[in-house]
Image (cartoon, grey):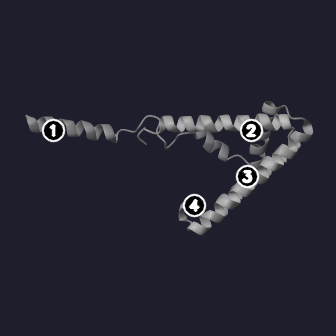
Amino acid sequence: MKTLVYLALALTTLIGWSQPVRGSHDNRNPMKEKLAELSPEQLADLKTKKMTLQLDLDEKQQQQIHNFHLNQIQNRRQEIENGKKPKDMTAYELYAFKSQQLDRQIAAKDQLRSILSEEQFDKLEKSVKRGKAMMLKRASRDHGRRP
């Protein structure tokens, strides 16, 4: 009898672990995959329209922001095609990679600051901080889940 209980418990555990997890990480956001298939021009256009709604950009700012986003997307795709993955890098290569990444972020922030008014830039900064906070909250909430 004891053996049957252990066998039933083992089978139940095995069957439970073999089932796919609801909300699995494999196919977390299919829309993100579809957006990756868009051309850089299309992505830049979407990002520019989103910023226009958020910050009330004028025509000149829209054109400058569109060029900014287009340049960022093209550079990112080129880096992905040409670059190594950070886990395959040596310590020195990783340092150089991170340093270049931070330099690019500083340059991008300066470029945005020159395009946007002070009020628009502050509004954008608050929005970015809020988005990061929500992402961290979501990550901590999902931390204990089984992949």
Q: Which numbered disc, 4 or 2, marks the residue closer to the eye?
A: 2
Residue plotted at (63% across, 39% down): 132
Query: Reading the chain from its start, which is encountered first: label 2 or label 1?
Result: 1
Query: Reading the chain from its start, which is encountered first: label 4 or label 2?
Result: 4
Note whether residue 50 is visible: no
Per the model, the C-alpha gap separating discs 2 and 3 is 13 Å
Pointer 2 residue: 125
Q: Which numbered disc, 3 or 1, marks the residue closer to the eye?
A: 3
Type of amino acid at the residue the image marks with label 4: Pro
The quarter holding residue 98 reads bottom right
Relative to 2, 87 lies left or right: right
Tag 3–tag 4 contact (CB < 8 Å): no
Pointer 3 residue: 105
Q: Which numbered disc, 4 or 1, marks the residue closer to the eye?
A: 4
Residue 26: where, in percent of width, then height? 49, 44
Per the model, the C-alpha gap separating discs 2 and 1 is 58 Å
Tag 2–tag 1 contact (CB < 8 Å): no
The quarter holding residue 80 reads bottom right
Residue plotted at (27% across, 41% down): 14
Pointer 1 residue: 6
Badge 3 density bin: few <14, some 14–19, many ≥20, Cα 10 Å: few
- For the N terminus, which image quadrant? top left
Per the model, the C-alpha gap separating discs 3 and 1 is 57 Å
Type of amino acid at the residue the image marks with label 2: Glu
Type of amino acid at the residue the image marks with label 1: Tyr
